């Protein structure tokens, strides 16, 4: 796919500023800032612009975490992972240029389903996509550590997209000891404060599958302490509607001992998955690179946007998209700052 003349002109030396984008409707609000639907003015390419406030990042002492998130996510290329195209900053904010997933959070999509759960064919399809993306991350020595429906988005093509790599780490060989993520999705070793590795993400895949089929995580209770105890004991059960094939996969993933959890390569070919997903038509990318993504999105420099979503132009029908841009200083840079040195009190 050839890049447009506009995108060819946007080479790696380009330094982004807020003035390069039209800012649209809010897509979400987080602890450290907001996300807006935005459009690059020259190419008309739609993106999600995540705006983070430096003051809030500093107050929570997470500047290092943001730098790590950017370093990791800008290098990931997978159909089922939200692409980070670039970043820039000014005196008060950091801006992340992210792939736009038009159907929003998987969490909301799940809650809107009848009985607030997925039928098994859709659950199998989604778990296959998530497992393949996590396998891709692990092959590149990246641990996500916060897999849950709120951190997964849905594109207009029905493909899941893992986002929010805020807790992710690059761990080539050693185990990690930081406790992070959401309690309902944490494996026993993390709950107990022990060291953990890639198998923590595999546990989360099992939790996710259970929630897809049941409508809630397996260890969810009304109190923190009881949830904690249930995770430690690996104490959960199944409603009668969950089939034996699905139960078998979940049981093989939700093992208390990390080394006993089913490896991702075996999750992808599990009989229950194979009964609902035509694996022969799936292009598994675990360790090989993603040819689908290369076809859909040109491999581009950090500061270049591809022309893969449909161009849009401002018209009388466009008034719902455009809203005033957040105020910005005149100085900005395409390099992520050492945020601690960039504050103006």
Image: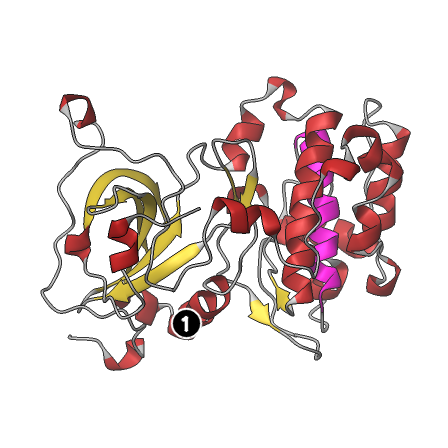
- The residue at the point 69 percent across, 50 percent down is 132
Question: Is 281 placed above or below 78 here?
Answer: above
Residue 336 lies, in percent from the top left, at 32, 72
Question: Is 152 placed above or below 232 here?
Answer: above
Nearer to the camera, 118 or 132: 132
- The residue at the point 51 percent across, 59 percent down is 165
Furthest residue toward left: 330
Q: Tag 1: Cα neighbours inside 10 Å, few (<14), some, or many (≥20)? A: some
Residue 94 lies, in percent from the top left, at 28, 63
Q: Which residue is mark 1?
A: 67
Question: Is 120 placed above or below 17 here?
Answer: above
- Residue 286 relative to residue 49: left or right: right
Residue 250 lies, in percent from the top left, at 82, 42
Q: Principal SS element in the magenta part?
A: helix
- Residue 321 relative to residue 291: left or right: left
- The residue at the point 71 percent across, 65 percent down is 198
Nearer to the camera, 101 or 181: 101
Query: Across the whole image, how many numbered discs are drawn on residues?
Result: 1
Furthest residue toward bottom: 341
212 in the magenta segment:
yes
Residue 283 lies, in percent from the top left, at 69, 45
The magenta stretch is 197-215
Say what secondary structure mark 1 lies in.
helix
- The residue at the point 80 percent across, 36 percent down is 273
221 in the magenta segment:
no
């Amino acid at each position: 796919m050839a890049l447009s003349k506009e995108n060819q002109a946007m080479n790696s030396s380009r330094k982004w500023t807020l003035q390069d984008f039209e800012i649209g409707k809010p897509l979400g609000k987080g602890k450290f800032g907001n996300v807006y639907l935005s459009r690059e003015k020259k190419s008309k390419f739609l993106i999600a612009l995540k705006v983070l406030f430096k003051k809030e990042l500093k107050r929570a002492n997470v500047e290092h975490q943001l730098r790590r998130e950017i370093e990791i996510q800008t290098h990931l290329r997978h159909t089922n992972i939200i692409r980070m195209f670039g970043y820039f900053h000014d005196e008060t904010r950091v801006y992340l240029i992210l792939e736009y997933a038009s159907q929003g959070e998987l969490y909301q999509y799940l809650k809107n389903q009848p009985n607030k759960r997925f039928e098994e064919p859709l659950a199998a399809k989604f778990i296959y996509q998530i497992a393949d993306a996590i396998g891709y991350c692990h092959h590149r020595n990246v641990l996500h550590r916060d897999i849950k429906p709120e951190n997964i988005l849905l594109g207009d093509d029905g493909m899941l997209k893992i986002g929010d790599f805020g807790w992710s780490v690059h761990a080539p060989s050693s185990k990690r000891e930081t406790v992070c993520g959401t309690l309902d999705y944490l494996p026993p070793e993390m709950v107990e404060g022990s060291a953990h590795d890639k198998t923590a993400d595999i546990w989360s895949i099992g939790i996710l599958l259970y929630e897809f089929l049941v409508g809630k995580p397996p260890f969810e209770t009304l109190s923190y302490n009881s949830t904690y105890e249930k995770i430690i004991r690996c104490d959960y059960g199944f409603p009668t509607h969950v089939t034996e094939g699905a139960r078998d996969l979940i049981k093989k993933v939700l093992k208390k001992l990390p080394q006993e959890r089913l490896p991702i390569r075996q999750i992808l070919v599990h009989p229950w998955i194979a009964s609902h997903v035509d694996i022969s038509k799936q292009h598994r990318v675990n360790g090989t690179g993603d040819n689908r993504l290369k076809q859909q999105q040109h491999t581009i420099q950090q500061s270049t946007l591809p022309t893969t979503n449909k161009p849009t132009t401002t018209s009388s029908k466009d008034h719902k998209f455009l809203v005033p841009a957040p105020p910005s200083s005149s100085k900005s840079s395409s390099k992520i700052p050492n945020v601690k040195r960039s504050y103006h009190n």
